[in-house]
Amino acid sequence: MRFMKLKMWLSTIQRKTWIFAGVIAGFVVLAVACLLVWMHLCGYTLAEWLSKYWPTLAVLGALVLMGAFALVFYKSRKGKF
């Protein structure tokens, strides 16, 4: 039953929204690819790079997580979720 509700809800989303989400996802993939290329060109392996920059990644991850929670809380308070 939940799958049907989800499927119906997804079908009501406009095509422009899906295109916008696809473009954003493409930019995220491009950014990650550029990060990996930059890391390789600087002579780092993934393990070395993560060991050097893990605090920055932890802070960025926490900010993204807090932003997602804030968005969910804001939407649920307005009754849109």
Image (cartoon, rainbow, N blue to C red):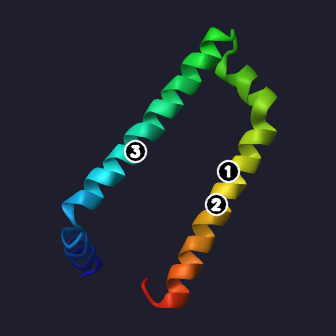
What residue is shown at x 80% (from left), y 27% (from top)?
52
Image coords of residue 48 (percent x, y): 75, 21
Q: Position of residue 31 (x, y in %)?
A: 51, 32
Between marks 3 and 1, how big is the CA–CA gap? 17 Å
Q: Secondary structure at mark 1?
A: helix
> In what element is the residue under mark 2?
helix
Q: Which of the two labelled residues, at mark 3 and mark 1, occupies the earlier sequence position?
A: 3
Do tag 1 and tag 2 residues touch (Cβ < 8 Å)?
yes
Task: Give the quarter of the figure containing the N terminus.
Answer: bottom left
Whole-percent x, y for residue 19 in the image = 26, 51
Side of 10 relative to 24 (left or right): left
Determine the CA span between mark 2 and mark 3.
17 Å
Amino acid type at mark 3:
Ala
**Mark with earlier residue (2, 3):** 3
What's the mark number on residue 61?
1
Q: Look at label 1 and name its amino acid.
A: Gly
On residue 40, the disc is none
Camera-side residue: 22 or 40? 22
- Say which quarter of the image contains residue 16: bottom left
According to the picture, the residue beneath numbered tag 3 turns out to be 25
When the figure is inspected, residue 62 is found, relative to residue 11, above or below; the finding is above
Image quarter of residue 15: bottom left
Q: Name the kind of residue labelled 2 in the image.
A: Leu
Marking on residue 65? 2
How packed is label 1: few (under 14 Cα within 10 Å), some, or many (20 or more)?
Answer: few
